Amino acid sequence: MACCEKCMILTDDASCPSCGSEKIRDPKENDPVYLVESEAI
């Protein structure tokens, strides 16, 4: 699993499903990665 450097969203794809960025990397221990997708809070 990797994360988008811009959105910090986890993904298995080669690009971010949210912004389309291809700057995908392995998450680091101190990254603020968002784990949940939601329509509203």
Image (cartoon, helix red, strand yellow):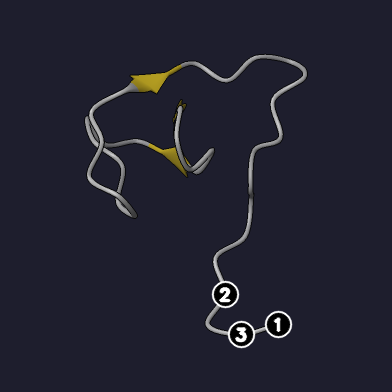
Tell whether label 1 touches label 2 (CB within 8 Å): yes
Q: Which label belongs to residue 10? A: none
For this view, does 31 lie left or right of residue 24?
right
Check disc 2 and report its element: helix, strand or loop.
Answer: loop
- Look at label 2 and name its amino acid: Ser
Residue flagged by tag 3: what amino acid is it?
A: Ala
Q: Element at badge 1?
A: loop
Say which residue label 3 marks: 40
Q: Number of numbered discs present?
A: 3
- The residue to which callout 2 is attached is 38
Work out whether 28 lies above or below 4. Answer: above
Q: Residue at x 64, y 50 (%)?
A: 35
The answer to which quarter of the image holds residue 16 is: top left
Residue 27, x across and y down, in percent: 57, 20
| Residue in the image at 48% along x and 43% along y | 7
Say which residue label 1 marks: 41
- Residue 3 spot, x, y in % from top left: 47, 30
The residues bearing labels 3 and 2 have C-alpha atoms spaced at a distance of: 5 Å
Cβ atoms under marks 3 and 2 closer than 8 Å: yes
**What residue occupies the far front of the structure in this picture?**
6
* Kind of residue at disc 1: Ile
Residue at the outermost right position: 30
**Taking 11 as reference, is 36 above or below it?**
below
> Residue 1 vs residue 17: left or right?
right
* Along the viewing direction, whichever of 5 and 28 lies nearer the viewer: 5
